[in-house]
Every structure is written in structure tokens, then in C-alpha cells.
Image (tube, rainbow, N blue to C red):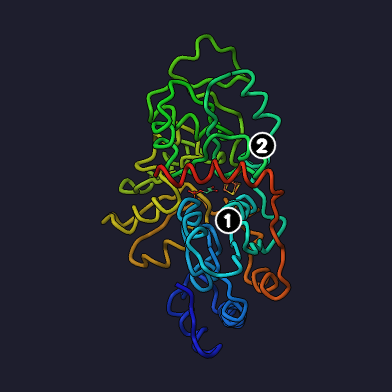
Amino acid sequence: MPINEDTIEATYLKMQEKLCGIVPEIELRYKAELVYEINRLKVERNAVILGHNYMEPALFHTVPDYIGDSLELSRKAVQTDKNVIVFCGVRFMAETAKILNPEKTVLLPSLEAGCSLAESITAQDVRKLRAQFPGAPVVTYINTYAEVKAESDICCTSSNAAKVIEALKSDTVIFLPDEYLAKNVARDTGKKIILPRKHNHNGLANAVIAWDGRCEVHEKFTVEDILTVRKQFSDVVALAHPECRPEVVEAADFSGSTSAMAKYVQNSSACRYLLLTECSMGDNIAAENPEKEMLRLCSVRCQHMNQITLEMTLNALNHTRYVIDVPQDILTRAQRAVEKMLEIL
Ligand code: 13P
Ligand code: SF4
């Protein structure tokens, strides 16, 4: 919930209560002014702020009206009655909000907030795969741009990928563009994996046809990381996002979307966790669970998510920037794929 206090001082005190030990004191003073101003402008502009779980703690705990993973925020984007949606996340997320709300103004505070997965595939790549594997439905991860969603039958997120594949009731599916998520989902759904750009494929029965896109953050984690931490802390509970390599997911104790991992920590009684995901989320979970210890490999930040700061969010509201637009023909087709996902689950 946002910190909606009447004065900057009261905003600062609330932030201190929540973020003491997580955000340096000197930053809290300065950031309280930004938070106060953002929350004031948000009301004036009739705006809603959606914040992804990877936002830095001083932003995550203070200005978003709703926080969550990609699926939760897509659902919130549909439900809002505000005129302006400020998306504190990356471009594919803001585009999804626009696809679901064509008549609203959707703002992304930085144009640098991309995603290595979304960059890894084009609409033409999808058309080629359809031609190569006729009849196989195309499932695309929400971490793609609108042109790619427009070529797809249905979208999915990290929290519903297996359910979407099962709901299609098709023996063979094309699943794009995350190779590791595809492999993790193939294992969960009992299908074999085919990577058309890497190896020959003999027989398509019961298969997930994948692409070789990678998340530049999650591909850094290794089984070695887990083993090294386990050696030092035998009681550690390891949590891995399904964008991690399959062997990392298998070596972990739990794998799920960013929100699923946060809920796992909230509901579990263990006292020490290793988070194999973007590091800011570890800070955000630590702020909510001060009695639990969050271990993380702290050099691992998403350079794209990291672009979104309180300063940029204030500028977004002040100057109505950066406006996300999707051409109408692409939007209509992409909307079908996203809505189909929201309908069935
Ligand atoms: P979630 O949908 O799990 O929040 O994942 C989004 C993402 O980009 C993870 O890297
Ligand atoms: Fe994309 Fe990976 Fe960053 Fe998520 S963490 S936005 S998948 S680059």
C-alpha cells in the first residue's frame, strides 16, 4: 500500500519504520520528499501506480497502489478505473497494460527499461516457426513485445505457464521465447523439448518446441551457487525463479513466480532463504519479514528494472512520459492472446 501521509516528515517516519536497515538513512530523508510528491501528483492526475516485485525497496514500499508479479499486475491493469496507469516495471509490462486498456494513458518512467527475453524474438521469427510446425498452437511468455504477442494464440506468465499449456489440450505446442522456462515447463507437463535452432527434431509427438531466449539475470545462477551456500548454511531454503536453468530449478527447494516466492517465505517457518532472482526483491521480502534472513548473490540486478527510480516516476507524472502506444492492428491481435490467458485462469 502506498504511504499517503499529510506531510513530508510523516512520510519519512513511515518509510523509516518500514525500511530502516534496508535503505540508508541519508537516502530515506531525500526519498521521502519524492514519495510525498509522487503520491500527491498521483491523486491530482487520477493515476494508478503498478509496481513490479523487482522495484527498489524505497519505491516498492511507498508509491505503488498495487504490487505483484506479471500476472497479478496484468489483472490489476484490467480492473482500474483511473485515467492514467504508471507502470513501474519494464516495457513489455507497460505494453500489456496498454493492450488491456487501449483508451487509457499508460506511462513507463524510462524508455531504457527493456528485457533480454523480449529482445530475443521478433514477429517474423514466430511466423517462420508457425510455417515450420503447422498446427501447433503458439504460447508466448508475457515477456515479449506486442508484435510477438500479436502472432500468438495465447500468452502465459511464470505463474501459469504449465496451466496454459495443459489447457490447450494439444499434444505439441510452440512455447516462446525463454528456453529455460520452456524446459522447466516441459518437465512439469511431461513433454519432451525441441529447440529447432539447436538440434534436429525427429517426431513432434508430446513436445514443447522452444526458442533460445534467455533472461540475462536468471541465467547467471548456477547449481554451484546453491551448493556453496548449502555448505555454509545447511538449513537454507533455496528459491529459484523458473527463468533459471532447469538444473538450478531442480536443485532448489521451490520454484515459482516472483510473488509465489514472496508468499512462500511469508508462509514458511524456516529462518534462512537463498533467493535466486533479482536482488531488489530480496530487500523487499526482507522488509516484510524482518525476523527471516534473506541470502542473495547481490551483484545480480536487472539493469532494465533498475532504470525505474522514484525520480523517473515523478518525472513520468509531471511530464506525462513516456507514453506507451501500440498500433491498432497489433493491439487488437495481441489483446486476444492476453485476454485468452486471463479468461482461462
Ligand atoms: P514474474 O511474472 O514472476 O514477476 O516474472 C517477471 C520477470 O520478468 C522475471 O524476471
Ligand atoms: Fe527481463 Fe530478466 Fe529483467 Fe525479468 S529479470 S525483466 S526477464 S531481463
Seen from the viewer's position, the closer of residues 257 and 271 is: 257
The image quarter containing residue 176 is: top right
Q: Is residue 18 left or right of residue 217?
A: left
Query: What crowding class fits label 2: few (fewer than 14 Cα within 10 Å), some (14-19), or many (20 or more)?
Result: some
- CA–CA distance in space, label 1 to label 2: 21 Å
Kind of residue indicated by mark 2: Ser
Does any portion of residue 326 appear in the rendered image? yes
Mark 1 lies on a secondary structure that is helix
Seen from the viewer's position, the closer of residues 233 and 325 is: 325
Question: Is disc 2's CB within 8 Å of ligand 2?
Answer: no
Q: Position of residue 64 (x, y in %)?
A: 52, 69
Q: How many numbered dots are placed on residues in this image? A: 2
Which of the labelled discs sits on residue 97, or is there none?
1
Tell which tag, 1 or 2, sits nearer the viewer: 1
Q: Is 319 placed above or below 330 here?
A: below
Mark 2 lies on a secondary structure that is loop
Kind of residue indicated by mark 1: Ala
Q: Is residue 78 left or right of residue 294?
A: right
Instruction: Mark 1 and mark 2 in contact? Answer it, CB < 8 Å.
Output: no
Q: Is 271 placed above or below 127 here?
A: below
Q: Is residue 155 left or right of residue 108?
A: left
Seen from the viewer's position, the closer of residues 110 and 27 is: 110
Q: Position of residue 45 (x, y in %)?
A: 62, 77
Which quadrant, please, contains the N terminus? bottom left
Q: Is 96 placed above or below 206 here?
A: below
The image quarter containing residue 313 is: bottom right
Q: Is residue 50 left or right of residue 147?
A: left
Q: Position of residue 153 (x, y in %)?
A: 54, 34
Does any portion of residue 282 appear in the rendered image? no
Tell me which residue sits at (48%, 78%) in the image.
3
Which of the labelled discs sits on residue 120, or is there none?
2
